[in-house]
Image (tube, coloured by chain):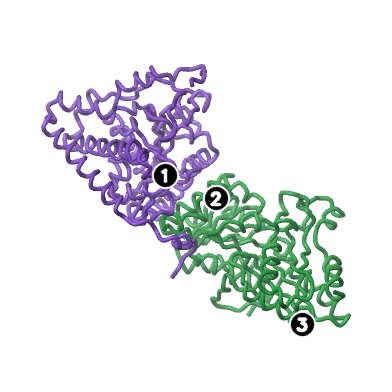
Amino acid sequence: MALTTYLEAIRQGIWEEMERDDRVFILGEDVGVYGGAFKVTAGMLDHFGPKRVVDTPISESAIVGAAIGASYMGMRPIAEMQFIDFISCAFDQITNVAAKSRYRWGAGVPIVIRGPSGGNTHGGPFHSQNVESFFLNTPGLKIVQPSTAYDAKGLIKAAIRDEDPVLYLEHKYLYRRIKDEIPDGDYTVPIGKAALRREGGDLAIITYGAAVYTALEAADTLAKGGAETEVLDVRTLAPLDEEAILETAAKTGKVIVLHEACLTGGAGGEIAARIAAKAFDFLDGPVLRVAAKDTPVPYSPPLEEFFLPQVGDVLEAARILLDY
Amino acid sequence: MRIGISNKPETDMTKRETTAADGKNIPKEIKKQLLHYMKLTREIEYRVEKVLYRQGKIVGGVYVGRGQEAISVGTGMLMRENDVVAPTHRDMGIFLIRGVSPRRIIAQYMGRKTGVTQGKDGNMHMGDLKHNIIAFVSHLGDNVPQAAGAALAMKMRGEDRVAFCYSGEGATSRGDWHEGINFAAVHKLPVVFFINNNQYAYSTPVSLQMPVKNVADRAPAYGIPGDVIDGNDVLAVYLSAQRAVEWARSGKGPYMVEYKTFRMTGHSAHDDAGYVPREVFDEWKKKDPVERLEHQMLGAGEITNEELAGMASEITGIVDDAVDWADKSPYPDPEDCLKDVYFEK
């Protein structure tokens, strides 16, 4: 076991998979010589060489398209989006090629597209987004968002080994702020399985990514008032662990869905709809969503603080449900 | 309906080689194969567009490459079995040269379970990794980065293979076309870019598609060679492709060849191409690639009229059989809709 940052855990996961399987390679902007904008791929060019770590032009669409083409040849590419915000440039290759390839003509696309997402880092509109819901409505993709260093390593390994295209959304705010004890040796975290971060019977917060920590902080405050909160970290957005979600909803009857992405059209709607349809009899109050405001991510600190879902927002929603 | 356009479509072409002398270097047997595949391509596409579609046996879109057969066939004959190809919608010849059966192709058009994509996609939206063919998507230009990626894998693994990538001139206006070629050129990847400039993208003439005269005028911007070739002279196509593929195979990086031709149909079966001046069609009819090769071979004593008749009847037989087999094939089960979204063990 070793105390490892979330970022280092991702780096280790990629490194180990590169050693384990020489079909795995990395491509993206500044991933080689520079080691990646956040240093996730530091040291890899020197160790694995330029055939395994490819510095590309600024061409997100070609980065993903080339990853797809290489995967048709049996390779296992990891395509980096320097900031996940730039994934929109590759939207076409992801949704119309990668996602539909196996369905249309039986050709699997075992690629990973990864990049730093999320705000609270003064990044402004184009360096702070959460992009999962842009892709949720596209069958054929898998989408994961780890919140712990343990999961970061396990999920990147699982994503690399997965036969389908996986969007691996790492949260930049967590890169160096989160440290966990992670085991030595090889392990994976299954895609499609949620993790219970905290058990409780009075209220549930279903969440993922950096918002998990907001949920846990809110849970601590609520505990002081005598309410025990269950925090379920879904970890995978596609496919959702519906069983775990419904179990938590049924157990508590009062559910908050919390995420950092904007409210309208966010993944929270999908989760809430499934709970309303399939756990309705167990509900003891409406399913409430707490999320970022429906605006682009603003830059100035007081604006961004207002924009992001804070512990206070979660407590307000909890109050409504507990009083229901 | 005729839309006023400022330039007449291109009727004379910049040739970077002639075939008069070089054509003699192509063995008769290769020429016969070129002729066979062009004729087979034409017959299949005729049946699909003019017969089956009109009979209502094919629904949705039908896109053929009539008049442009020399391009897919002339270049396609250079493919080695382990080369990888990323065709577009007017490259039927590629599939035939690769050995995808006419039966499966017609069944594909007819949406049957026995079609190349088992009904999951239609018309030319097909591919088969067993034949090293990458299926194209409707978003033109998307295949260019994919071909570059395939070539990247080849180079990484030190394989003696080339990726063949096809675009129409319309596709060259998309960002992915630029990104893919730029990427391939920067990394000196073994990929050849063959451009079918048939001078119309739907109703858009090439003068509204690009400000330069030739697509290949852009090749120097990527630091790669770019040739402009008569796309209706299959022997010129073959020789130019041979040069391009040799270049890429020897590790010198990508090569672009633009083939000038003309789209002798509408964009699709439902389009009568009323926006094209009729005299332009007449002009290009005289340059028909199939007739040209026939004429040349007959004149050189490389084929007889009896052999031509035999070839025609063989092809008719192949296509009759394919249509019959496809028409008798079942449709997919409705629940097949749910299959293969994800990997299933």
Q: Residue at x 39, y 29 (%)?
A: B263
- Residue A50 in percent (x, y) is at 49, 54
Residue A294 position, x and y percent, is 78, 53
Residues at marks 2 and 3 on the same chain = yes
Q: Position of residue A198 (x, y in %)?
A: 73, 79
In this picture, residue A238 sits left or right of residue B137: right
Q: Amino acid at mark 3?
A: Gly
**What is the display colour for chain B?**
purple
Amino acid of disc 1 = Val
Badge 1: how crowded within 10 Å, few (<14), some, or many (20+)?
some
Nearer to us of marks 2 and 1 is: 1
**Residue B260 in the image: above or below residue A224:** above
Indicate the amino acid at tag 2: Asp
Say few, some or many: other residues with alpha carbon within 10 Å of mark 3 (under 14 / 14 to 19 / 20 or more). Answer: some
Q: Colour of chain A?
A: green
Tag count: 3
The residue that appears at 25% across and 43% down in the rendered structure is: B319
Instruction: Report the chain holding disc 1.
Output: B
Residue identifier under label 1 = B59
Snapshot quadrant of residue A310? bottom right
**Circle 3 is placed at which residue position?**
A201
Q: CA distance from mark 3 to mark 1?
A: 56 Å
